[in-house]
Structures are given as C-alpha cells and as structure tokens.
C-alpha cells in the first residue's frame, strides 16, 4: 500500500510520533531536512555532468526525473514509473531542455523544462550518495514556521557538504521559535550566511543572489498553510517564480493547499518537491502536480505502520503489482459467454464512432461477446462497420421492451457514449441505469441525463460505475468544471455521497472513489490521452473487466491499464500527442499479459 495523507492526517502523524512514540519534534525535522539534503545533493551531482552528461545517462529517454546516481531498485521504491533506472538525467523527457553546465537557464529554457511528466518516487533512508564537496551556489528562502526550520536543516547539511549556501529569512529572526529556532541557531552559529527580509524590506538582495544561484530551495510555507498568501510574502514568491535556476520546494510548494491542490493566492512553481513522510493529497491533483513538478518522498525515520493505524490515510496510489494480481489466467475450458457478455448501449446519428470505440475496447479487454445496442435508424449504418461485434436495435416505439430483450443474459452494460440527449435517450437511460439489476458503467450522455437529479442514481438497482470528466461531474453537481478541478477530491467525495456509486473522476491523476470511503489515485498516464474517444475506450474496458472482477477492482484496473497504454505509446513514439483512441485498445492485451506476469510494461 502507498498511502496518501491529508493535511490533518499528516499533522496527526507528527503529533503521534512526538507524543505517543516519544520521537522529539526536532528529530523529525532533522530527518526531514537531511533527507531533502540527500536528494538535493544527488540532483546537484547529476547536474554537474552538464547537458551531455545529463542527456546521456542510462534510462534517460522518456521520464524527466532528476535521477539519482548509483541508485537502484533495491534502494528506491518508485510510484511512477514502478522502477526508475539509476543514473537517469535531470531533464530526460523528449523535447525538454537539459541544463547547461553551470545550472543556469534562460527564461525560455526554464519554461520549456517545466512541461513535465510528474514522476513520483519514494526515497528511503539513508538517502542517496553523492560526491563531496558539492560545487553549487544554493539559495534557501525560509519562512518563520516549521517549513523554514526544515530549510535551515537543509542549508546546514548542504553547507557541510561544500556547497556555497545563502539563506534568506522572510521575517525577523525573533519570529522563529521552537524546533525551527534550534535549527536557525545551529546554521548561523556554524557560520552560515543569513539575510533577513522582513515585511517592508527590499527584495533586491534576494534577486541579486538568485541571479547567481544554481539552485533555490523554497522553505517558506509547508502543509499547514490554510489561508491566501498576500503582501510581502506574495512578493517573495513572485521573485522565486522569475528565477531561471532550478527550484526545489520542501514538503509542498509554498502557497499550495495540501488538501485541494489549489494555489492559495500566490504559489511557488517548483521543478522538484521533496515531501516528508508521505504523499500529500494536494500534490496529486493536476494543478498540484503542475506546481510541484517531480516529487521525492523521504521518510522521517519512524515506522509507518503503527502510526498510520492510528491516524489513517485519505487515499492510496494504484500499484501495478496490485492490479496484476487480480488479472488471473483463464481456465483452458472457458467459452465466450464465460469470458464476458457485454452490452454497449451507445451511438446515434453522427456519433457511431463512440459506440464502436466502446465495444471494441471491451473486446480487446477480454469480453468474449460484445453487442452494440443502438437506435433503429442508425443500426444499419453500424452493421456495415462491424465484424467481431454484434448489433441490436432500440425501437423508439417500444423502448423498454426492446431494451429488456437486449439485456437478457448480459453480464455487464456500458451505456452513454454518443447515445443522445433527447427524450427517447432519457427514457432508455432511466430504464437501464435505474431499473436493470446488473453491473453498469455509466458515461457521457447517460450521465448528462441525470443533471439536476443526481440523487436519483442512489436509487438504481444493481451496481453503478460512473465515469465523468470534470465537466460532466460539474454539471451533475451544479458547478463549473473549473470548480471541480479546484477541489477534485472534495467533488468526487460529494458525488459518491449523492449517488452511492463508484465514481471515476477522469483527468490527470484520475481518482476512483468508492461508497465505503476509500479512494485510489492513478499516477500513470500523460497528455496523449487528451484525444477524442479516449473516455469511450475506458468505458468499454471497465465493462469488460466487470465480467470477471468486483466493481472496485474493475474500475481500478481499467483506469490503470488505460493510462499505461498511453505511457507505452509515448515510450514507443517519444510524443505526448497524436494518439488515437483506437490505438489505446490495441495495446490493452499486451498490458494485461505483462501485468498478470508481474513484469513492468515500461521496462526496456
């Protein structure tokens, strides 16, 4: 299990470690800061190779991560991809910009480098080795709270390792208290350079230092921030966002809401984030991932299991190993009806492609028999385009009776893609979604028919898996797509509470939310999935998997395999665009085979 924690849960984790496990807070801060210093040291060493060295490091072909020297799979547990080859360079994604030898970039290079693939890796103690002394000029910008204390620990360790370090404190020193004060004093008394930048002070010294820096560390605010950043501190963050050197945030980028992933006023745009203890849920939203960049998780030097048993976690990351274990080999005697009998209720005039994509995806995902059920006036056009698929029609004059005939003997139904938004479509949707006692994947037009009445879905017979994107979920909940994106986790929880269904909120970092309160997050996938019909393919895949798995497992497996298909395609082509929805389905059988065998589909 890879747990993801909320702000409150992470605060409770620290409190339990301090008060029940008697690990002093200053020890937790030291472990966090030292872990971050280890990661930063390894990044500095990787960058010291310059553009040729960085670009030529092993494994540096697809995933742009600051790969860590001499770091193998026995030392690092990566979330995405599952294993990252040691020594990969800092900006290895095709089309990105490798760093120049001195670590400086011009403004265009900095913008290009921040178009990222968002890998996440766990980095257990004792961290990564690096060759000392470090040759780098590092600026650390600290706040007066605990995140600033982490920054002072990082500054002290980098100073001890030979880096040229300068700390800027965005407050007066007397504002720093508690464990942070201990580390403030330790850094200063060891000869560390410190400049105070309280409210009203000129930011010129900071701008001058950043102009010469190879790397800046953001240690202004951590997970505790719950209010918009304004005034002087917003100005400091504005300066950080103009830098062309590498920017590394501690725990979360300053200004990021650790729960929703939305920026609280001003927010730091980091290249890398070193987060402490566990992933925070706000880092796993599209906006949170954009602001955090590549995320490294360093442990706090305390056993997780007993503390997590007390404080809980809000979500889990989908793991390839878990999904693979649910993809059991078939018996030699299986026949097509046992393999899965799926009905796809989809398509209308001008939207036949949606039905075809859904049905073919179900076949490629292992359904033994798939039938497209569509309107009588379009079924003949459909029949000329299918070979392996069967068709049946919905009689507008006898919708319920024709649907009942089509539903007989089916194991699972996919309903909605391209079906239409008129009254006859609404009647068909209500009859199947609310009345049929079976396994159903509800998507696209079928979801739209419940706008203004999402609670009706809670009365449905059978089991529902809803697969909205943010626009569709926004319509169901009566708000904009932007509002959904600003709090994806809150929105999907609300949708589950209203509908009592499994809800798959599609998008970067797709979320699967269950009625029992559990949530799963998919870390795979890339922008190539932003292509017409991609969602229809996912609907067909989940419907096929429902024939052999429980609904939660089917939704999770469908989401992960769908996302991995895009990652395999990008690995083959080097592109983040141009993927056709039909190509996703073609990759599915190979992915199922690889996952079932316990192998990584992305391994060379």
Image (cartoon, rainbow, N blue to C red):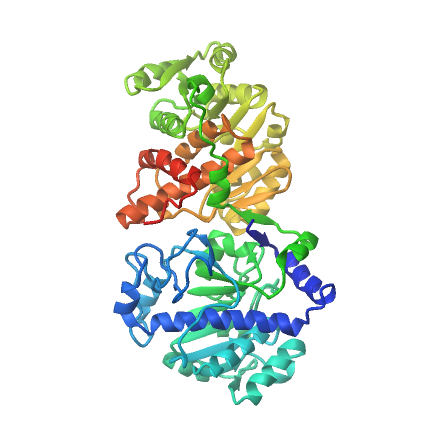
The structure residue drawn at horizontal position 39% and vertical position 55%, both measured from the top left corner, is 117
Which residue is at the front of the view, 123 or 108?
Answer: 123
Q: Is residue 369 left or right of residue 223?
A: left
Is 19 left or right of 545, judged from the image as shown?
A: right
- Residue 369 drawn at (x, y percent): 41, 19
Q: Position of residue 128 (x, y in %)?
A: 45, 68
Residue drawn at (66%, 58%), measured in percent from left and top?
8
Q: Quadrant of residue 184?
A: bottom right
84 to 138, vertically: above or below: above
For the question of whether residue 39 can be seen, the reply is yes
Please name whichever residue, 259 or 264, is drawn nearer the observer in this view of the structure.
259
Residue 441, horizontal then vertical, whole percent: 50, 29
Q: Nearer the viewer, residue 164 or 399?
A: 164
How many marks on residues? 0
The foreground one among 508 and 469 is: 508
Q: Can residue 237 be seen from the camera position used here? A: no
- Residue 197 position within the rendered picture, expressed as x and y whole percent measured from the top left: 53, 82
- Decide if residue 11 is on the left or right side of residue 344: right
Does residue 227 sit above or below 45 in this rendering?
Answer: above
Q: Quadrant of residue 552?
A: top right
> Of all residues shown, which one is farthest toward the right?
20
Determine the residue positioned at 62% across, 77% down.
Answer: 180
Q: Is residue 103 above or below residue 526?
A: below
């Amino acid at each position: 299990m890879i747990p993801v924690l909320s702000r409150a849960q992470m605060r409770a984790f620290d409190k339990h470690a301090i008060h029940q496990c008697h690990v002093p807070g200053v020890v937790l801060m030291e472990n966090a800061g030292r872990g971050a210093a280890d990661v930063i040291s390894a990044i500095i060493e990787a960058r010291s190779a310059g553009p040729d060295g960085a670009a030529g490091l092993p494994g540096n072909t697809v995933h742009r991560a600051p790969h860590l020297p001499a770091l193998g799979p026995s030392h690092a547990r990566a979330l995405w991809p599952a294993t990252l080859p040691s020594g990969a360079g800092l900006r290895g994604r095709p089309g990105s910009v490798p760093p120049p030898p001195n670590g400086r970039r011009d403004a265009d290079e900095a913008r290009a480098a921040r178009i990222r693939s968002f890998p996440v890796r766990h980095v257990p103690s004792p961290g990564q080795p690096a060759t000392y002394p470090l040759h780098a000029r590092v600026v650390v910008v600290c706040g007066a709270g605990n995140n600033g204390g982490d920054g002072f620990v990082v500054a002290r360790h980098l100073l001890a390792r030979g880096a040229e370090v300068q700390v800027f404190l965005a407050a007066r020193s007397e504002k720093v208290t508690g464990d942070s004060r201990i580390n403030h004093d330790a850094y200063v008394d060891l000869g560390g350079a410190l400049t105070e930048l309280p409210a009203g002070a000129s930011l010129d010294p900071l701008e001058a230092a950043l102009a010469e820096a190879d790397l800046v560390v953001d240690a202004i605010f951590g997970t505790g921030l719950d209010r918009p950043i304004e005034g002087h501190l917003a100005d400091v963050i504005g300066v950080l966002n103009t830098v062309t050197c590498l920017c590394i945030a501690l725990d979360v980028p300053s200004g990021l809401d650790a729960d929703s992933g939305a920026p609280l006023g001003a927010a730091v745009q980091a290249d890398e984030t070193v987060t402490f203890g566990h992933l925070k849920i706000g880092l796993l939203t599209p906006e949170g991932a954009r602001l955090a960049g590549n995320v490294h998780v360093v442990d706090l030097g305390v056993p997780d299991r007993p503390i997590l048993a007390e404080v809980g976690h809000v979500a889990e990351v989908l793991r390839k190993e878990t999904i693979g274990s649910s993809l059991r080999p078939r018996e030699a005697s299986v026949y097509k009806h046992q393999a899965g009998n799926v009905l796809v209720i989809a398509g209308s005039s001008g939207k036949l492609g949606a039905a075809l994509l859904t049905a073919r995806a179900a076949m490629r995902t292992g359904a033994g028999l798939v039938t497209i059920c569509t309107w009588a006036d379009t079924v003949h056009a459909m029949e000329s385009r299918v070979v392996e698929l069967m068709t049946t029609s919905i009689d507008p004059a006898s919708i319920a009776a024709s649907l009942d005939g089509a539903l007989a003997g089916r194991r699972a139904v996919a309903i909605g893609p391209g079906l239409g938004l008129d009254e006859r479509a609404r009647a068909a949707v209500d009859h199947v979604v609310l009345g049929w006692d079976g396994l159903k994947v509800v998507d696209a037009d079928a979801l739209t028919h419940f706008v203004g009445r999402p609670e009706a879905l809670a009365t449905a017979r059978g089991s529902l898996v809803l697969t909205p994107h943010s626009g569709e979920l926004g319509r169901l909940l009566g708000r904009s797509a932007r509002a959904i994106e600003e709090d994806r986790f809150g929105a999907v929880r609300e949708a589950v509470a209203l509908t009592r269904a499994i809800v798959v909120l599609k998008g970067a970092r797709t979320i699967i939310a269950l009625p029992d309160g559990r949530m799963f997050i998919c870390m795979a996938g890339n922008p190539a999935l932003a292509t017409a019909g991609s969602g229809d393919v996912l609907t067909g895949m989940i419907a096929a998997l429902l024939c052999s798995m429980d609904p939660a497992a089917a939704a999770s497996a469908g989401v992960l395999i769908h996302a991995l298909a895009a990652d395999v395609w990008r690995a083959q082509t080097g592109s983040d665009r141009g993927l056709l929805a039909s190509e996703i389905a073609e990759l599915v059988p190979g992915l199922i085979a690889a996952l079932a065998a316990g192998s990584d589909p992305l391994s060379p």
